[in-house]
Image (cartoon, coloured by chain):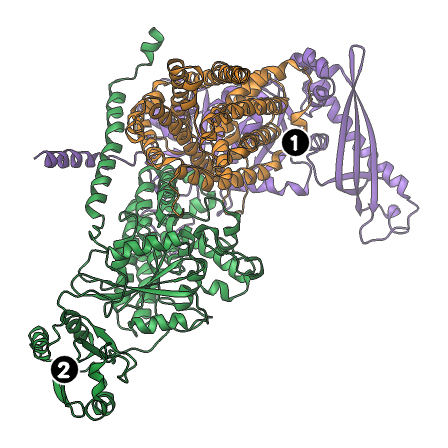
Amino acid sequence: MSAIIKHIPSWDVWGWTVVALLVPIAFHRLFLKLSGMLAAQPLSYSTPQGSCVHDQPSQAPFSGDYDTDLSDIEKRIGGNSDVSIRPFTMTRIGARAVLILVDGMQNDRLLNLQMMDYLMSEATPDLLTTADQGALKLPFCNLIVTPGADSFAQSVLFGHAGLLIEGLGKGLLVELPDGMNRQMNEPVSEALLRGPRVGFTEVLSENTSLLRRQGFSEQLEMKSYCVGTRLKKDLVVAYIKDIVNPDLLQEVEKRVSRMNIDFASESGYVEQLIEDDVLSPFQQLQNTERPDRVIHALLEGRVAILLDGTPFVLIAPATFSMLLQSPEDYYERWLPSSLLRLMRFGAAFLALMAPAFYISFISFHPGLIPTELAITIIETRQGVPFPSLIEVLILEISIEILREAGIRLPKPIGPAMGIVGGLIIGDAAVQAGIVSPFLVIVVAVTAISSFSIPSYSAGITLRMLRFAGMLFAAFLGIFGTILFFLLLCSHLSKLKSFGVPYLTPATPFRLRDWKDFLIRAPLTTMKRRPAMMKPQDDRRQS
Amino acid sequence: MFIRTDNKITRSQAIVFLTNTVLGAGILTMPRSVSQAMHTPDSWLAILLSGLLILPIVWLMTRLSLYYPGLTVFQYAGRIVGRLPGTVLGLMLVVFCITIAGFEIRILAEVTMFFLLEGTPIWAIILPFIWAGTYLVSGGIQAIARVYQIVFPLTILVLLVSFGVSLRLFDIDNLRPVLGDGLAPVWDGVKASILIFSGCEVVLTIVGFMDQPRYAVRTMLTGIAIPAVLYLLTIIVVVGGMSLNTVITSTWPTLDLVRSFEITGFFIERLEFPLMVIWLMQMFCNFCSFFFQASLGISQLFRLPPQPVIFALVPIIFLTAMAVDKQKELFALGDIIGYMSIGLFVLLTVPLLIIQIIRKRGRRQHE
Amino acid sequence: MNSRLRVIAMSLLLPVLLAGCWSSKEIEDLALYAGAALDVGMEDETERVLEAKAAKYPRKKKLTATVQIVPVRTVGGKSSKQGGPPHMPYNNISGTGDSILEIFRQFSIRLDQPIIGHHLKVIVVSAELLKEQPIENVMDFLLRDNDIRPSTMVFVSQGPAKDTLVSEANNSVPAFHIMGMIRNRSRTSKVMAPVTLNNIDGLTYAKKSFALQNLVTANGEVEFSGAGIIKGSSGHWVGTLNQMDAEALTWLRNEGSAGVIKAEVRDEPLTYEIKEMKSKISSKVKGDDIEFDVSIKADGRIIEIWDSAAGAASPFTTEETTAVVQKQIEKIMNAFANKLQKKYQADVAGFGDRFAIEHPALWKKVKDNWDEVFSRSKINFTYDVKISEYGSFVEE
C-alpha cells in the first residue's frame, strides 16, 4: 500500500495532467470550428451540365413578337454605351431584323460583307417558315438559338453578335466573340529545357482545342458547366472516357456543379471551393499552364478542369509525388531523369528542414557536430548578438521579402536584384556582425533548394512549413524537429484529395507506382498506369 | 468504389504495423538486460531461441483471430466466453497497453533528457509527444498504418547502416566461448528477453482490420520475424563490438556502441545522431500503436465513440508515464511488463483459443 | 460572453510558451574542452594565490584536473587582421579537489562559460596519480557523464599529465595533436592501439590487467613511449613497459600493422621492415599447469644494411639473415614475457582471454587470481620469419 502511495505523483504533475487533457480538446474544438466556418457552402441545387451560352434554361423566354422582344432587349442592355443596335430590313423577305452587338468584340468587316449582305439581299422568305428557327437555312456555322431574352442579352454582352428576326420567335447568336487574344507563349511559371513551348491562354476554346490537338482520339471528352451565380463563366471538365474511373468523374462533376460563388475569376477560386481540406497547407489539386502536363495527367486517369479567362488548368486528384514531378523527367532518358528527381526530393527535404537542423545543432546539440566544424562555428559566431532562432528568422524573412519584391520588379531589374540581394546583403550582414557566415550558407542552400521545386504552389507550402519547423526546433531541439516531421507525416497521411490518399504511392505501398515516384524507371517498364487512380483500362503498352 | 470508406489495411501495412509495435525501447536496453541475466556472451543464442519461441505464439494468436474475421479481440472475446468475462479480459489487455504506452514514453523521455535535452523539464518532452500521438491516432488505423510505412524503411536503413559501420569494432572473440557455461544461462537469457517481444498482442487486434484475412498467418509471421532478426543482429553487433563486460555496465549499450567511434572526414561524424532520430520516430510509432489499441479497446468494449476516448486516455497515459521516477524502478517496470505479456498470453489467448475450439467441436457434434 | 471568456482563458495559456527553450544554449556560449589531464593533487600558482586570499572550500586535494579549452575567445568577433603576438589557440585551466565533477563545477566560478565535454578527445592520467588512486575511482565520473563520448582515448603519462597538454608549436592544439599522432600508428608497431573509455569500462568491471599508452614530454613536445601497466586486482599503476615491450605487446595482441626490427650484425644495424605481423596464442592444460603456445609470424623486407660484408656482394644468405632477425625478435619477446610474468605479474597481452575461450570451465576457476596463475604458466614461442624481398637493391 505504501508503495502505491509513494508512486502517487505530486501536485505539479496533476496540474500538468489537466493541461494534457485540455490542450488536445481545445485544439480539436478549434479545428472543428474553423473547418466548419471555412468549409465551402455548396449550392442547394446543382447547375446542370452545359455551357453558359446554350443549354441553360431561361427565366424570360421570348414572346415571339418582334417589337416586344426588341423593346425587352433594349430595356435590358440598351442603356450601355458600347452596345450598338442596328436595325435593318431583309429586303427579299420583307421582314425587319436587328443586329445587336458590342463594339470591339466583332470583326466588322466580316459582319458587313457577308452576314449583312446575305441577310439583306439574299435571304429567302421560306426562312421564316421553317420550324427550327431558320437554323438550317442560315449560312452561319456558329448559330445558336437562345430561348430567352436574359440569355440572349448575356451572350450579346459577352461578345456574341445577336440577331433578332421578325417572324422567327427566338433570338439568334451568329458569331463567336473575337478579338483581344494573346499568343500562345511558353508558360512563364513552368519553363522547361526540353519539351513543347506552348502554354494555355485565357480563351477557353483555344485551350480545349490545344488539348484536342495533342493527338487523334475519340476518347477525350469534355463537358462544360456554367459556374458563377452573378457573372457566369464557362468551365470545362476534360477526361479520357475509357480510362478515368467513373466514380472520380462523378465526384468532380458534383463538386464543380455545386460551387457557390458569384464570380469564379481564376481557377484558384475553383480549387479553393472544391478541395477537401481547407486548413491543410498542402494543395490538393494541381495547377499547370502546360498542355503536355494536362494530357499526361488525363492519360493516367485524372480529370482536368479548364476555366475560361485563365491559363491555369486544374488537375484532380493530386498527390504528394506529383508536386515534385516535372514533364521534363519523361522527355529525357531514365538515368538522368531518375537522378534529377532524387535530387529534387533531396532539395525539397533540405528546403523544409535545413534551418530547423541548423537551430537544433547550434543551440541544443553541439555534441552532434564534428569537432572541427564546431570550433569553426564558435569562432565565427563570436560577437553575434542574437540567439540562433532570431538570427535565422531575420535572414529568412529578409529573403522572403526579397523574393516577393523580385516578382514585382520590372524585368531588367528583377534578376539583378536577386543576385544583389543574395550576395551583397548576406555579406553585409556578416560584416556587420548580425549573422554568422555559416548561417548565410544554410539560408542560401535552403532558398536555392526551394527554387528547384517544379510547382510554385508546392514551393510556397514548403516555405511556410519551414517556419513552423524552425519554431519547433527552437523549442525542443532535434526532438522538436522530429516531432514536427512526424506531425507533418501524420497530417499528410490523413489528407485525401478526392478520395486518393495524399501520400500515395509512398503508402499504401504499391510497388507498381514506385516506378514513377523517386526514380523514373525506363519507359519500357512503365507498362501500366498508376494504380492509385483506379483506372478502367490500365495498360499503356499492349 | 473509388473512395475507400472501409477501415482496412493492406498486407504490407499489417506487417509494418506489427513490426513497429514490437520494435521499441528494447533495441536500446536489450543487450544489457540479457547479458546481465546471463553473464556469458551467448546472449545471441538466447535471442535466437526466444525469436523461435515467439513464432508459434503469434501463430496461435492469429488463428484465434481468424475464427472471427473482421472482428477484433474486444469484439469476439465476449462472444466466446460471455459478455462479462469478455469485458474483463478486454480490460486486461487495455490496461496492459496503457502501461506499455506510459513505459515507452518514460524511457523515451529518459533517453532524450540524458543525451539530447538536458535542462528541459520532463513534461515538456512527454506532453508534445502525447499530443502528436493523439493527432495521429485520431486519424484512424489507415492513417496510422501509412505513417508507419513511411517510418519503417528509414528505420531499417539507418539501423543497418549504423550496424554496418560499427562492424569496424567487431571482434568475433567477444562472442566466444560459445556455450562456455552450458545451456543454463541461455535459459535465463530467454526469460530476460521476453520483454522485447511484448506488444505482439496487437496481432489480436489488427487481424480484424486486414483486407485479405487469408494471408493473415503469413503476414503476421513475417511481421514478427523482422523484429526478431533485427534484435538478433543488434545483440550480435553490440556484444561483438563492445565486449560483454562493457555491455553489462552500460545503461544504453546500443547507443554507447555507436558513440564509441567516430568516422572522421565523413559528413555525419557522429553516428548516434541518425540513430537517435530514427529511434525517436520508432518510439513514436510504438507509442501510437499501443495508444490506438487502448482507445480501440475501450471504445469497442463500452460502445463509446472513439474520439472522446482518445482524449480521455491522454491524461491517463501521462500519469502512467510520470508515476515512476527512479531509473531502477523504470527497468523493473519493464520486467513487470514482460511478465504481464506472458500472463496475458496464458490468461487471454490460450483460454479463448481452447474454449473456441471446444465450442466449435461441440457445435460440430450437434450438427 | 461565454465564448469571450474561453478566448481569454486560452490566450492566457499562450505566454506559457514563452517560457520554453530550456536547454537552448548557443554554441558560442559554451566552452568545449578537447583534452583533460588528471594529476596528483597539487595546486598551481593561481590557485595558491587564490587560497592565500581565503578563496577556498573544504577539500583533501586528492587530484588536480586540467582541461584544455578550445577555441580561445576573442572579444568582438573577428580576430584582428594585423598580427598581435601569436597566441595559443587553446587555454588550459587547472583545479584541485577531491571529485572531478566538483572541480569542473568550480571552474564555473572562474570561467564565464560552462564547460562541456562533447568534444573531449584525449584524457591523460599521470602515473603518480594511478599509484595512489585505483583507476576505477579516477575514471568513474568520466564514464558516467552523458556528455563525454565513450570513444575518448585514455593515456598514461610519465611526468605530470598537464605538461602533455602544453605545446610549443603555435598553431596546434595539443589534444588534437595527440589524436593525430594516434592516427600515425600505422607506421610503427611501437604505439599501442588506443584504449577508449569503453574498453576501460569493461576491463575494470572484470578486474583485468591492461596497459595504457605512455606519454613522455620534453621541451614542449610529446612522444609516445612504451606503456603503463594497470594491475587488474588493485587498479593501480605498477610499472612501465619500454618501447620494445610495447612492440611485443602490440604484436601479441595482433594490433600491429607495420613495424621495424633492428638487428645487429657485427655491430652494424640490419633493419627489417615488417609488412605483416601476426601472432596466435593457444593454451594447453597439463594437470594443474597451464601452458601457452605462441606462434609469431612476420613477413617483411630487409630495408637497410650497414655492414659492408652483408652488402651486395656478400656471402650472407637469406637463411642467415632470417636467423639474425629471428634472434632479435626472440630477444624482444622473451624480455617481454619475462617482464610480464616475473616483474609485474600482470597479463596485459590477452593470454587470459584466449584461455577463457578455449577452456571456459577452467577459466571460471582461475579467473579471480588470474595474474598469479599466469605468472606461473609456461609460455613457448615459435617463430616464422620471412624475408620476401630486399627492396630495390638486389642481393645475390
Tag 1 secondary structure: loop
Disc ID at residue B171: 1
Let me know if residue C157 appears in the view.
no
Depicted C338 relative to depicted A274: above or below: above
Q: Position of residue A203 (x, y in %)?
A: 29, 73
Q: Could you tell me which chain the residue with mark 2 belongs to?
A: A
Three-letter amino acid code of the residue under disc 2 = Glu
**Residue pictured at 55% horizontal, 21% vertical:** B193
Q: Counting other residues with Cα less than 10 Å from the Cα at mark 2, is it few (<14), some (14-19), or many (20 or more)?
A: many
Tag 2 secondary structure: loop
User: What colour denotes chain C?
Assistant: purple
Label 2 belongs to which residue? A166
Three-letter amino acid code of the residue under disc 1 = Asp
Depicted B181 relative to depicted A519: above or below: above
Measure the alpha-carbon separation of dots 2 and 1.
104 Å
Judging by colour alone, the chain drawn in orange in this rendered image is B
Q: Is residue B128 left or right of residue C359?
A: left
Q: Position of residue B60 (x, y in %)?
A: 55, 22
Q: Could you tell me which chain the residue with mark 1 belongs to?
A: B
Depicted A438 relative to depicted C181: above or below: below
- Frontmost residue, A303 versus A504: A303
Let me know if residue A267 appears in the view.
yes
Q: Position of residue A150 (x, y in %)?
A: 14, 69
**Residue pictured at 41% horizontal, 43% vertical:** C71
- Frontmost residue, A447 versus A248: A248
Judging by colour alone, the chain drawn in green in this rendered image is A
